[in-house]
Image (spheres, rainbow, N blue to C red):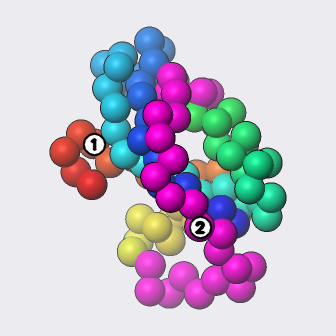
């Protein structure tokens, strides 16, 4: 599982944010390969209406036996979603990092 801390930009078709809005996000991808994980993240972000990954702020590869008991409820859900769907995303609205 890879965890990317990103800065992303809303595209023309984004349903929540006006085009050009830049926000911070965390993307979890269930892949051991960093390049494959980043490509899966980019594909999913594009599918959700994000225009670009403006900046990868940090990357972390979680071990297969990661103990998520200390994670917040939001991170626990994102981890479970990434396990189930391959990719999950947590978006922090502008001004909330």
- Magenta region: 46-71
Q: Residue at x 35, y 19 (%)?
A: 20
Binning the other alpha carbons within 10 Å of mark 2 as few (below 14), some (14 to 19) or many (20 upward) gives few
Number of residue marks = 2
Q: Is residue 29 in the magenta section?
A: no
Quadrant of the rendered image containing residue 64: bottom right
Residue at the image point whose x is 32% and y is 26% from the top: 21
Q: Badge 1 is on which residue?
A: 93
Disc 1: CA contacts within 10 A as few (<14), some (14-19) or many (>=20):
few
The earlier-in-sequence mark between 2 and 1 is 2
63 versus 25 height, above or below = below
In space, the residues marked 2 and 1 are separated at their CA atoms by: 22 Å
Rendered location of residue 72, percent (x, y): 39, 74
Kindly state the secondary structure of the residue where label 2 is placed.
Answer: strand
Residue 45 makes an appearance in the image? yes
Q: Can residue 26 be seen in this view?
A: no
The answer to which of 91 and 33 lies nearer the viewer is: 33
Q: In this view, does 50 lie above or below 26?
A: above
Which is more toward the observer, 67 or 95? 95
């Amino acid at each position: 599982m890879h965890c990317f801390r990103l800065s992303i930009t809303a595209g023309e078709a984004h349903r929540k944010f006006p085009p050009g809005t830049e926000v911070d996000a965390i993307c979890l991808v269930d892949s051991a390969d960093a390049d494959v994980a980043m490509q899966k993240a980019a594909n999913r972000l594009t599918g959700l209406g994000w225009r670009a990954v403006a900046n990868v702020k940090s990357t972390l590869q979680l071990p297969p036996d990661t103990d998520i008991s200390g994670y917040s409820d939001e991170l626990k859900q994102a981890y479970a979603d990434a396990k189930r769907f391959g990719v999950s995303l947590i978006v922090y609205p502008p001004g909330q990092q």
